[in-house]
Amino acid sequence: MPEIIVPATSANMGPGFDSLGLAVNLYLKVRISKQSDQWIVHHPFDKRVPTDEKNMIVLSALTVDASIQPHEIFVESEIPLARGLGSSSSAIIAGLMLGNELSESINLSKQQILDRAVKIEGHPDNVSPAIFGGIVVGGPDPQKKGNFLTYQIDTPDDYLPIAVIPDRELATSESREVLPTSLDRRKAVRNNAESSLLLAALFKHDWDNAARLLESDQFHEVYRTKLVPELKTVRNLCHSVGIFGSYLSGAGTTVMIIAKKDQADFLLDQLNKTEKLRGCKIKLLEFNLSGANISE
Ligand code: HSE
């Protein structure tokens, strides 16, 4: 039975709001079982997540080809819902790949899956790394409406992602509501410069400067801090021990730190000892480099 595997992602890397994200080694897995009279989705989530054709995975599959036959599918997931780790993007991509697999007339390329996924999700910063793996920058193709350009960037060998995951959900819609509708020009110019610098540093493998630039967002963190106070706690703790590289992952509530491997155990210990982070899951992760795939 074919199995679709899609990694979790961490979007909004520093000043790359809505455009820059990375894939990590937590996975959504969808096993395609037998054809059925109606869609049956077995999943590990609570009752809010539909088990029929209203499930997001099935809805996405039907956007590829509305004529595909219903199937029974089995979902496993290590990606917590509504925590800024791309759970909805992973579900959308798994659905598009499911539709692609079951359709007799359609055979989408990864690029076409990306364009469709962005159309459903609204922005490319989670879906791009989920499809391609690694660190990916993505944005609209200025000349081709509805198409997205992406560039994959090497991940550093001597750094790894550490996720501080609060025991609290935050819907992206709620987290976007606190953002201002316009941005002061000086802030926009500064964000533009810092985001260009971050990309240059990433492409040059200058991870020391990249880690510092990861803390230079002007678009969202300051407004979302009231929803995710853990960001300040984590960043203050990291700075007190001379570590840079923390940012609010996606719309929250997860805070991500891109830390040097040789500092990771020490940092993990400090994070675990911090009273204000009690209840958070603190996970040492790895970059996922291959992105979504389907195994027969
Ligand atoms: N870039 C998005 C946001 C990620 O910050 O709202 C969450 O989907």
Image (spheres, rainbow, N blue to C red):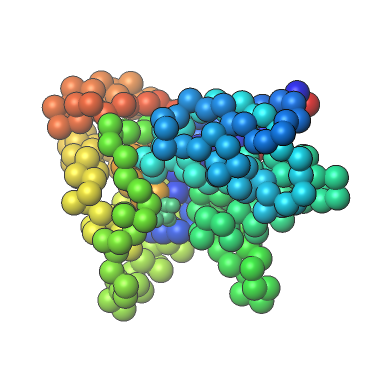
Q: Residue at x 33, y 21 (%)?
A: 265
* Residue 52 place in picture, x, y as percent: 58, 37
* Residue 209 place in picture, x, y as percent: 39, 50
Q: Nearer the viewer, residue 12 or 190?
A: 12
Q: Residue at x 41, y 68 (%)?
A: 192
**Left or right placement of residue 34 versus residue 14 in this view:** right
Q: Residue at x 22, y 49 (%)?
A: 227
| Quarter of the image with the N terminus in it | top right
Q: Residue at x 23, y 23 (%)?
A: 272
**Left or right placement of residue 216 versus residue 146 in this view:** left
Above or below: residue 287 compared with residue 184 = above
Above or below: residue 226 compared with residue 183 = above
Quarter of the displayed picture in which ligand 1 can be seen: bottom left
* Residue 126 place in picture, x, y as percent: 51, 49
- Does the rendering let one see residue 294? no
Quarter assignment of residue 189 = bottom left
Residue furthest out toward the front? 37
Above or below: residue 183 compared with residue 231 = below
| Quarter of the image with the C terminus in it | top right
Residue furthest out toward the right? 105
Residue furthest out toward the left? 275
**Left or right placement of residue 266 versus residue 144 in this view:** left
Quarter assignment of residue 138 = bottom right
* Residue 222 place in picture, x, y as percent: 23, 57
- Does the rendering let one see residue 196? yes
Quarter assignment of residue 253 = top left
